[in-house]
Amino acid sequence: MANKNSYVYGISRKRKTNIRGFYKMEDGSIAVDNISPILINTQGEFDYTIRNIFRLGEEAVFYRFSDRGFIKTKEGKITKFENRIELVRERLSTEEIKKLIEQYGGLTIFKGENGYVIEIWRK
């Protein structure tokens, strides 16, 4: 259930954002999306936001509540991620990103004050 200061992470198709999501597709290719965090304060806002994301044609959506991550598919299947790994790098190489995606299946990267922040969620 939604609680105050939770986030739904939508995909921004029209504008570039400072957060990139990388994930490995079933065919082995790597998808890259511009991620736009949406602050959620109520259950009604959560339900409305999720419905709209699926109406836009997304197959799944990532959201975060109470220091846990979740992926919900349009069919209603929910996968829970209880472990968050955060790595900070002054510089990032394409090879390191590829290795992390191979190891974990997906991650997000954004530019922080001390370098690039890599966020990985695990079950």
Image: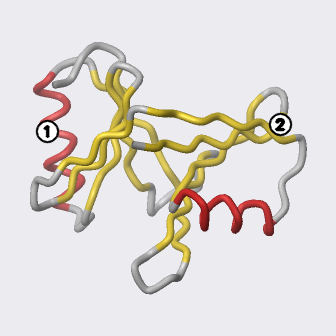
What amino acid type is highlighted by mark number 2? Gly
For disc 1, the neighbor class at 10 Å (few under 14, some 14 to 19, many from 20) is: few
Give the left or right position of residue 94, taking residue 122 as reference.
right
Q: Secondary structure beneath disc 1? A: helix
Q: Earlier in the sequence, mark 2 or mark 1?
A: 1
Give the left or right position of residue 93, taking residue 11 as reference.
right
Residue occupied by mark 2: 115
Residue at 30% of width from left, 51% of height from top?
61
Q: Give residue 48's mark.
A: 1
Q: CA distance from mark 2 to mark 1?
A: 34 Å
CB under 8 Å between callouts 2 and 1? no
Residue 103, percent across and down? Answer: 60, 61
- Residue closer to the observer: 102 or 18: 102
Hey, which residue is sitting farthest bottom in the picture? 27
Residue at 13% of width from left, 24% of height from top?
43
Question: Is 111 situated above or below 72?
Answer: above
Hey, which residue is sitting farthest right in the picture? 90
Residue 47, percent across and down? Answer: 12, 36
Residue 114: image quadrant is: top right
Q: Give residue 104's mark.
A: none
Residue 5: image quadrant is: top left
Residue 75, percent across and down? Answer: 10, 61
Residue at 89% of width from left, 41% of height from top?
90
